[in-house]
Amino acid sequence: MAKYNRNQIIPIIIILTIIVAAVFMLVSLARILFFADPTINTPVSSDSSQQALLDKSAGREVKMTVRGPIVASEDFRHYTIDITPSTRILMVYKGYDDQQIDTIGLSNDPSAYEQFVYALNKAKFMDGTALIGDGNDTRGVCATGELYDFQILSSNKIIKEVWTTSCSSAKGSLGTSLTPIIDLFWEQVPGIDSKVNDLW
């Protein structure tokens, strides 16, 4: 009788074990298919602004604005370099009301733009953390030197903006070496030296 009971119980235990394992596998599969976190096993992007920088679709733009010392309106100068997948534009202004006094306009192509923005990325162009509130108010900052403002834009909307100055007392938010960034922008506009070297 004991042998009969053992022979009867062992298959029941095996069947129950198989059923429990099957249910566990089905539940696990359902969780993976319907409730999985989409970020698991997905590479984490370093920053949405980095993705915006490297995007070369229409409407994308990177911009550098350089403001000179704060002086009388007649003597005040600043310039901008706007680079898009299709254009490269230098604009030079006088006065605080942005009177255009010089320009260089050149065409661009997506492949050249791609190389440019990847070079900016490798130079840690957007690694800095954008400041907020009063910390991002550049009015009057570095009055005797130059202010450098950098933007990533999409369809004229600013995605991220960082800045720095030539004054040791106002480092801003750029967060990387300034010279390589300026050089990359300048190299995009042949003839820029003659337009901006003597502005201040």
Image (spheres, rainbow, N blue to C red):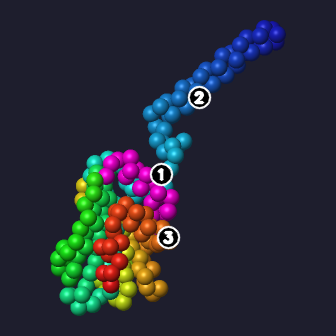
> Which dot marks residue 176?
3
- From the viewer's perspective, is 188 left or right of 9? left
Task: Give the residue displayed 47% in from the left and 31% down from the top.
Answer: 33
Judge whether residue 125 is colored magenta.
yes
Mark 3 is on which residue type? Thr
**Boundaries of the magenta span:** 108-133
Residue that carries the numbered disc 2 in the rendered image? 24
Q: Is residue 35 visible?
A: yes
Along the line of sight, which residue is nearer the eye, 70 or 188?
A: 188
| Of labels 2 and 3, the one closer to you | 3
The number of numbered badges drawn on the structure is: 3
Q: Position of residue 24 (x, y in %)?
A: 59, 28
The quadrant where residue 152 appears: bottom left
* The disc label shown at residue 45, or none: 1
Q: Earlier in the sequence, mark 2 or mark 3?
A: 2
* Residue at the image position 66 percent from the left and 16 percent from the top: 15
How many residues crowd around disc 3 within 10 Å: few (fewer than 14), some, or many (20 or more)? some
In this image, 117 relative to 105: left or right? right
User: Can you tell which mark lies on residue 184?
Assistant: none
Q: Which of the two labelled residues, at mark 1 and mark 3, occupies the earlier sequence position? A: 1
Q: State the separation of the CA atoms marked 1 and 2.
A: 34 Å
